[in-house]
Image (spheres, coloured by chain):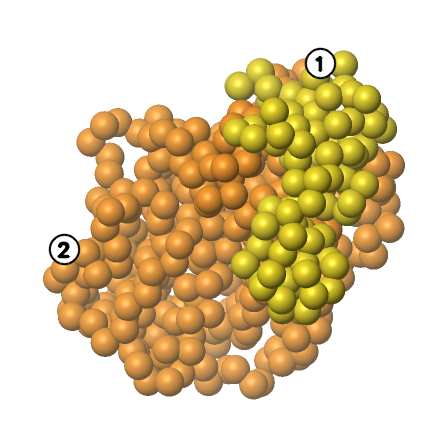
Chain colours: A yellow, B orange
């Protein structure tokens, strides 16, 4: 299990998720991959057809990520995100 | 509306019958060809008169516009493919206008449409980001993303589900007057509130029903016909915020002066509105962006103005009732506007409709649509 990583522009420090091809702020093309797994759930919905619960999670580092969340997770919860083949959020 | 009065015009339009449950013999290329033929014949032209072709379709793959040209026997001076989204028809229109103005082509046929047989597959492979980040969490397609967006909108404006219901309910009243709409029976608040949930808070009436169908337009420099609808202006915006915002406004907010000023009209002068309605929340967002009300006045608009029916919004029933034929979504709104401006809208005709506003919205790259576009159309004569 991998902690979620975001991209940080090496020139200006702007954060991105997912990794872009160029920095929208300064045009830079070099990025550092930085662990950024902590965030706060903003909204949660349950998808009837797939029975999946997904939410928007605002990372402390800035970007908003769409993640699979647990049954009891609700807006306002603090979560830890794990990346890899799919992004999941667990309550801290 | 002086500036563009001599510009290219929409001289023909066509639409196939929208099918909620298409048989296996219904194919994308056949629907595109049928809609295209309708538009050409509606314009009083023959296929041999067409010298430009633009195509938007998810499901024509592996074919492209050039394949369609070959199979229809079109000899072209100009051809265009659009990758396909809720903004496709406006994209095609924007390019076709310039092509005609530049003399690259004189009779440009625009076609869009889809037969979507494997929706989840299409939804999961909409782009690389979707297939890598959203498909694995089983997001199930854009409904869930717009459920999250609607929750943000509810929270910002203090709205409840009954507020969003006003959009599909009002559009269903229009659909009752449109024999071509796939859903025409009346919708009331009680039915809306007790309807199956697709992704909380969205219910089935908040999600445009997928249909098989195609639409077409003929954009021409020969605009003298009595049924020619003039194209006052077309504007578009793409990727205004890098998917870094909340999605509760679109690129139209920054474009509204640019859209209306050359036409000499304001938003409130528009007699007919085709506002891209993949979800009710986006109708509200676009209307606010275009200046129909200030964003903070969204609840007042829903509760006071919308029920009064002063604005003729999505008079075909919109995609929510008439159906969403994939990339034909925004062209459906243009075709409806053209019919209204020609006075050919039958029982749902808006009296003395002289001007129309059409929007498109789409390209959901990760969390919400990145593209928004709008056009002002004017009645013949």
Please tell me the numbered disc located at residue B80. none
Which residue appears at 65% of the width and 21% of the height?
A: A53
Query: Residue under circle 2?
Result: B71
Looking at the image, the residue that sits furthest to the top is: A71
Spatial CA span between label 2 and label 1: 52 Å
Which residue appears at 53% of the width and 25% of the height?
A: B138
Image location (x, y in percent) of residue B96: 39, 71
- Displayed quadrant of residue B190: top right
Circle 2/circle 1 CB separation < 8 Å: no
Horizontally, is B245 left or right of B42 in the view?
right
The quarter of the picture where the N terminus of chain A appears is: top right
Q: Secondary structure at mark 2?
A: helix
Query: Residue under circle 1?
Result: A71
The quarter of the picture where the C terminus of chain A appears is: top right
Instruction: Say if B79 sits above or below B362 in the image.
Output: below
Residue A65 seen in render:
yes
Which residue appears at 55% of the width and 48% of the height?
A: B365
Image location (x, y in percent) of residue A91: 78, 21
Instruction: Say if A80 sits above or below B239 in the image.
Output: above
Query: Do discs 2 and 1 belong to a common subunit?
Result: no
In the image shown, does A20 or A55 lie closer to the viewer? Answer: A20
Judge the density around disc 2: few (<14), some (14-19), many (≥20) Cα neighbours within 10 Å.
few
């Amino acid at each position: 299990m991998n902690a979620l990583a975001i991209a940080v522009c090496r020139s200006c420090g702007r954060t991105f998720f997912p990794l872009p091809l160029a920095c929208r702020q300064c045009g830079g093309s070099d990025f550092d991959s930085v662990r950024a797994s902590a965030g706060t759930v903003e909204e949660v919905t349950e998808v009837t057809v797939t029975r999946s619960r997904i939410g928007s999670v605002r990372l402390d580092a800035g970007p908003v990520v769409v993640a699979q969340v647990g049954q009891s997770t609700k807006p306002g919860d603090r979560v830890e995100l794990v990346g890899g083949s799919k992004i999941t959020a667990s309550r801290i | 509306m002086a500036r563009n009065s001599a510009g290219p015009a929409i001289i023909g339009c066509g639409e196939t019958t929208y099918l909620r449950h298409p048989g296996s013999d219904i194919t994308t290329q056949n629907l595109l060809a049928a809609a295209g033929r309708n538009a050409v014949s509606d314009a009083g032209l023959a296929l041999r008169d067409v010298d430009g072709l633009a195509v938007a379709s998810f499901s024509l793959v592996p074919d492209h516009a050039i394949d369609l040209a070959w199979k229809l026997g079109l000899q072209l001076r100009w051809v265009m493919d659009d990758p396909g989204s809720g903004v496709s028809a406006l994209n095609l229109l924007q390019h076709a206008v310039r092509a005609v103005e530049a003399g690259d082509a004189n009779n440009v046929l625009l076609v869009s449409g889809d037969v979507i047989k494997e929706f989840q597959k299409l939804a999961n492979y909409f782009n690389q980001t979707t297939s890598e980040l959203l498909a694995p969490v089983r997001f199930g397609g854009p409904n869930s993303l717009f459920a999250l967006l609607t929750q943000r909108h509810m929270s910002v404006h203090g709205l409840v589900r009954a507020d969003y219901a006003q959009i599909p309910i009002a559009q269903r009243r229009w659909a009752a007057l449109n024999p071509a709409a796939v859903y025409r029976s009346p919708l009331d608040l009680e039915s809306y509130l007790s309807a199956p949930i697709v992704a909380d808070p969205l219910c089935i009436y908040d999600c445009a029903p997928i249909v098989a169908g195609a639409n077409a337009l003929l954009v021409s420099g020969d605009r003298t016909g009595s049924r020619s609808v003039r194209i006052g202006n077309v504007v578009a915006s793409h990727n205004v915020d890098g998917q870094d915002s909340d999605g509760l406004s679109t690129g139209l907010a920054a474009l509204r002066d640019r859209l209306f000023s050359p036409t000499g009209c304001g938003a409130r002068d528009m007699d007919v509105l085709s506002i891209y309605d993949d979800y009710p929340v986006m109708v509200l967002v676009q209307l606010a962006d275009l200046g129909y009300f200030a964003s903070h006045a969204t609840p007042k608009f829903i509760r006071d103005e919308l029920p009064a029916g002063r604005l003729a919004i999505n008079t075909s029933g919109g995609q929510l009732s008439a159906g969403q034929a994939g990339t034909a979504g925004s062209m459906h709104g243009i075709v409806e506007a053209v019919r209204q401006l020609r006075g050919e809208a039958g029982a749902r005709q808006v009296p003395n409709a002289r001007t129309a506003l059409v929007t498109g919205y789409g390209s959901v790259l990760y969390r919400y649509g990145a593209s928004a576009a709008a056009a002002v159309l004017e009645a013949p004569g």
